Amino acid sequence: RLNEDLRLIEHNVRRISRIIRALLGFARHNSQAEGWGPFDLAHALHQACTLVRHQLATQLIEVVIDCPEDLPQLQGNVGELEQVFLNLILNAQNAMPKGGRLHIGVRREAEAVVLRFADTGTGIPPGNLDRIFEPFFTTRSSQGGTGLGLAVSYRIIANHGGTLRVESPPGQGATFTIRLPLHPPEAPQNSKS
């Protein structure tokens, strides 16, 4: 029994250590002086997923990242983009209270990289689709939602010269699509640390 308890403790210490390393990496990206520069998109996605992997697993949410290994490095503020990825992952989690699947697909299309965050959740009511990126619009105010996550994410993607769109056919979950140019405009003044 003691050995079993020790194995459980060791397992959880390792898990906490991974979470702390991911948090430190996330914080470091958000506080580095360079702000805007080249980054590895696959690494940024995995960083964001690592932060919430345990809580997603406890809610029976499977996360699949489908990202080719030969993607070129992108230019941008990796800390801000990780914030967008984390927000989309947490929104998917909230849409799947009884479990489900989040598929994050990444593809190069001409001079852009396209990321699709597709969940098997409850979806977004058609009446809310036009308002989803408005600041302070939320359907989760009773659960602490501020309505700022998607509005801020939209601004961050726009500052990177990209687009953020959503599709949600009734009863089929939601898919958020980010399109980032391979050669974005210069860093906006408010993106530099």
Image: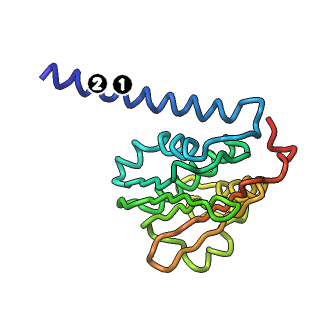
Kindly identify which residue carries mark 1: 13
Along the viewing direction, whichever of 188 and 114 lies nearer the viewer: 114
Which residue does the image show at 50% across and 57% down from the upper left?
Answer: 104
Along the viewing direction, whichever of 175 and 136 lies nearer the viewer: 175
Among all residues in the image, which is located at the extreme left? 1
**Quarter holding the N terminus?**
top left
Q: Which mark is residue 9?
A: 2
Left or right: 98, with 147 as reference point:
left
Q: How is the image coloured?
A: rainbow
Mark 2 packing: few (<14 Cα in 10 Å), some, or many (20+)?
few
Given the image, on which type of amino acid does mark 2 rest?
Answer: Ile
Proximity of marks 1 and 2: CB atoms separated by less than 8 Å = yes
Where is residue 31? Give x, y as percent. 71, 31
Where is residue 41? Give x, y as percent. 60, 47
Q: Which mark is residue 79?
A: none
* Secondary element type, mark 2: helix
Along the viewing direction, whichever of 109 and 53 lies nearer the viewer: 109
137 shown above or below 30: below
Given the image, on which type of amino acid does mark 1 rest?
Answer: Val
Quarter of the view holding residue 191? top right
Counting the numbered discs, the total is 2
176 shown above or below 83: below
* Secondary element type, mark 1: helix
Label 1, label 2: how many angstroms apart (C-alpha)? 6 Å
96 shown above or below 79: below
Where is residue 75? Give x, y as percent. 73, 46
**Quarter holding the C terminus?**
top right
Which residue does the image show at 62% across and 74% down from the upper left?
Answer: 128
Mark 1 packing: few (<14 Cα in 10 Å), some, or many (20+)?
few
Left or right: 187, with 43 as reference point:
right
Which residue does the image show at 41% across and 45% down from the upper left?
Answer: 55
